[in-house]
Amino acid sequence: MNIENAIKKAVKILKNENIKSPKLDSEILMSNVIKKDRYFTILNSKKIINKKNLYKFNELISQRSTGKPIAHLIGKKDFWNFEFQIDKDVLIPRPDTELLIEEVLKIYKHKNKLQVLDIGIGSGCILLSILREKKDFTGVGIDISGKCIDISKINAKKIGVTNRIRFFKSDVDNFNYGKYDLIISNPPYINSLDMKCLERDVVNFEPNIALNGGLDGLTNVRKVIFKSSELIKVGGRLIVEIGFDQKQKVIELFKKEGFYINKVLKDYGNNDRCIIGTKL
Ligand code: GLN
């Protein structure tokens, strides 16, 4: 069978299971199996695919049809300028979170030598991207999940920033190390009731611990803001990713802990996505 026909068959299967982007997904999985990029796959659609690869491809398509995310099937996800190793234990980096990187680079365009803390580092995508872009920044990443710390370490090596980052397996409540110029966090912020309404790919396959923010979604956001007010230098900035309907409540929390609100960032869907504050 050639690439084109294998993909056509796969698209049918994925469509039947209501997978949103069946063609793109099939192309990515095919490219992964034949170890080429997507352009090669598209431009060489008449090439015959060998039996072993066809079997592997069909196997991946069958897993994708259950909703298993592409990032889990290929073990990686592009974020910002880099490729991150991903598995089921970390939240898959979201394009919307790239806006946070863009904003940090804008704010600190002319700044060197900042100390950055990432609370709930996950795959490492936020802090590692910032460190790679700003050669004189140093970072600390914490997470309650040891598995996240392990993946972050692997990604730090891949991205080449190991010598400027330290990791701690810790709950934010018990973390008291250092004072920071910039604190960033994408904590779990979905409220427990909404967890059930998330897309199948997310709710069935991504870690509950990275998504579930308790009854009002703000359990961890509260902790992050409270603790950041102790860990941040005066004049330092705190950037927290939030749910689309949490802006007002989170602004109040920032103010209560002595932060001035600089900006509310919108995501690609025009939802309020990040609050940026400065410690007074
Ligand atoms: N933005 C993520 C989602 O929509 C949630 C991330 C989080 O809870 N921090 O699935």
Image: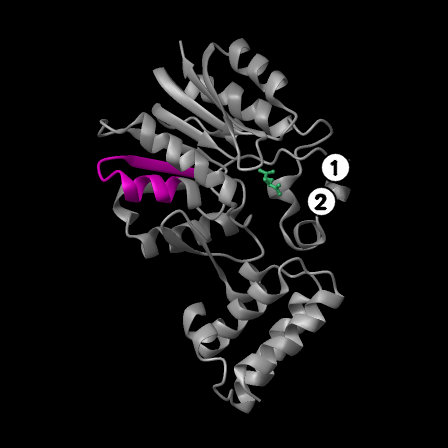
Q: Residue at x 46, y 79 (%)?
A: 34
Q: Quadrant of residue 168?
A: top left
- Left or right of 116 in this view: 137: left
- Left or right of 183 in this view: 27: right
> Which element type, helix, strand or loop, lies under badge 2?
loop
Tag 2: residue type? Leu
Q: Residue at x 39, y 21 (%)?
A: 237
Q: Which mark is residue 194?
A: 1
For the residues marked 1 and 2, what is the alpha-carbon distance in whole angstroms? 7 Å
- Return the x and y of residue 152 as percentages of the image width and height: 42, 49
Position of the C terminus by quadrant: top left
Contact (Cβ within 8 Å) of mark 1 with mark 2: yes
Asked if residue 264 is among those painted magenta in the image, a careful observer would answer no
Crowd class of label 2 (few under 14; some 14 to 19; many from 20; radius 10 Å): few
Is disc 2's CB within 8 Å of ligand 1?
Answer: yes
The quadrant of the picture showing ligand 1 is top right
Q: Residue at x 50, y 76 (%)?
A: 33
| Magenta-highlighted residues | 127-141
- Is residue 272 depicted above or below 43 in this figure? above
> Which element type, helix, strand or loop, lies under badge 1?
helix
- Left or right of 38 in this view: 104: left
Q: Residue at x 56, y 16 (%)?
A: 251
Tag 1: residue type? Asp
Asked if residue 139 is among those painted magenta in the image, a careful observer would answer yes
Position of the N terminus by quadrant: bottom right
Which residue bears the numbered disc 2?
A: 198
Q: Nearer the viewer, residue 48 or 96?
A: 48
